[in-house]
Image (cartoon, grey):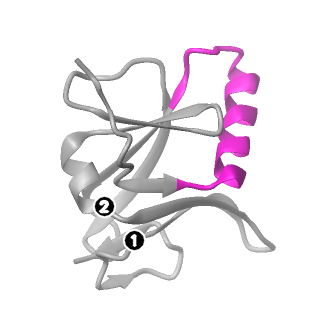
Amino acid sequence: MNKIDNKKPLEITERACDQVKALIKQEDNANLMLRLSVSGGGCSGFSYSFNLDDKSEEEDVIIEAYGISLVIDNMSAELLNGSIVDYVDDLLASSFRVSNPNASSTCGCGTSFSM
């Protein structure tokens, strides 16, 4: 059974949730959730990946906020503990960004980090 984490190992901002809602509306599939995962790679060792997904796995952590569901695999949740997910729209790019207190360094684009 999926674990809905009320202790919230991480937070997602209302701005990020609004962007997820817009993406879900474009896809015309109300069952979609935002999946955040961490994998090896990127210029700093680990990289973040954001995808829309319509299913979750048994071991996933599900965080509900502002009318959306954020799904994170258990291993990624450990690396993301205490993080804040935001959506940034600036002159250079528009993207989801993770502020991770566990990262010892991050790359300039904000999509990879090291621990």
Estimate the x, y position of residue 12 in percent, counting from the top left.
55, 53
Left or right: residue 115 versus residue 108 is left
In-front residue for pair 32/101: 101
Task: Report the residue at 65% width, 44% height from top.
Answer: 17
Estimate the x, y position of residue 51 in percent, counting from the top left.
49, 38
Q: Which mark is residue 100?
A: 1
The quadrant of the rendering that contains the N terminus is: top left
Task: Report the residue at 22% width, 77% height from top.
Answer: 115
Residue at the right extreme? 91
Q: Magenta stretch mostly in which secondary structure?
A: helix
Residue at which label 2 appears: 81
Query: Is the residue 39 above or below the residue 29 in the image?
Result: below
Magenta stretch: give its range. Answer: 12-33
Dot 1 crowding, Cα within 10 Å, few <14, some 14–19, many 20+: some
Residue 36, by quadrant, is top left
Left or right: residue 59 versus residue 21 is left
**Residue at disc 2, secondary structure:** loop
Task: Report the residue at 59% width, 32% height from top.
Answer: 68
**Residue at disc 1, secondary structure:** loop
Query: Is the residue 14 above or below the residue 71 in the image?
Result: below
> Which is nearer the N-term, disc 2 or disc 1?
2
